[in-house]
Image (cartoon, rainbow, N blue to C red):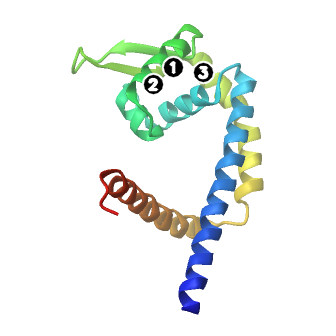
Amino acid sequence: MAEQKEHDRAVSDFIWNVVEIHAQLEEIHKSWAQMLGITEPQWLILLAIEELDEGRGVPGVAVADKLRVHPAFVTTQTKKLEAMSFLNRVTSPDDARFLQISLTQKARVQITNLSTKRQALNSEIFGELDPDSFHYLNKRLASIAKNSRLAAQKLIIGAV
C-alpha cells in the first residue's frame, strides 16, 4: 500500500513538472515569436519546417504531425507566413494535390540571428545534462509519449 502511494506521488510530481515545463517553454516560444512579429504557433511551424526540411520542402501534413495539430490549421498559418515572406509554398512535384513548404531566406536569416540567444537559453535550461543523459531521458520520454497516446485513445473509446 505504501509503495503504491509512493508511486502515485511520483507520478503526480512528474505530471506537474511536465505541466510547469510546458508552460515555461510556451512562454519562451512566445518571446521568440514576438521578436519576429509572429505568433507562437507560427514560430513552432517555422521550427518544425526547419527541422523536417531536407532540401525539397516539407508537406503540410508532416508539419501538422510534428506539432500534433490539424493539417487545416497548418494550411491557414502557412498562408499567413507566406504572406509575411517567411515561407514558400509550392506544388509538390510528386503529387499536385500537396504543397511543399520551405523557409525563405528571410526566415532563415531571422532564425539564425536568434541562434546565439537560443543556444545561451538552452544552455541555461539544459546545461546540467550531457548527451548520455539526454539520450536516456529522451528514450524514456518517447516511451511515455507513446503510452500516453495509447491511453488517450482508450479513454476516448471508453476502454478505460
The crowd level at tag 3 (other Cα within 10 Å; few <14, some 14-19, many 20+) is some
Residue picked out by circle 3: 107
- Residue 115 picture quarter: top right
User: Which element type, helix, strand or loop, lies under badge 2?
Assistant: helix
Residue 104, position as x, y percentages in the image: 53, 17
Residue 118, position as x, y percentages in the image: 72, 41
Residue picked out by circle 1: 77
Q: Earlier in the sequence, mark 3 or mark 2?
A: 2
| Residue at horizontal 72 percent and vertical 48 percent from the top | 24
The quarter of the rendered structure image containing the N terminus is bottom right
Residue 10, position as x, y percentages in the image: 61, 76
The crowd level at tag 2 (other Cα within 10 Å; few <14, some 14-19, many 20+) is many
Residue picked out by circle 2: 74
> Seen in the image, is 96 located left or right of residue 37?
left
User: Which element type, helix, strand or loop, lies under badge 1?
Assistant: helix
Alpha carbon of mark 2 to alpha carbon of mark 1: how far? 5 Å
Alpha carbon of mark 3 to alpha carbon of mark 2: how far? 17 Å
The extreme top residue here reads 83
Q: Amino acid at mark 1?
A: Gln
Q: From what the image shows, is residue 90 above or below residue 25?
A: above
Q: Nearer the viewer, residue 143 or 8?
A: 8
User: Which element type, helix, strand or loop, lies under badge 3?
Assistant: helix
Residue 86 seen in this snapshot: yes
Q: Amino acid at mark 3?
A: Ala
The crowd level at tag 1 (other Cα within 10 Å; few <14, some 14-19, many 20+) is some
Q: Nearer the viewer, residue 107 or 14?
A: 14
**Count of numbered marks:** 3
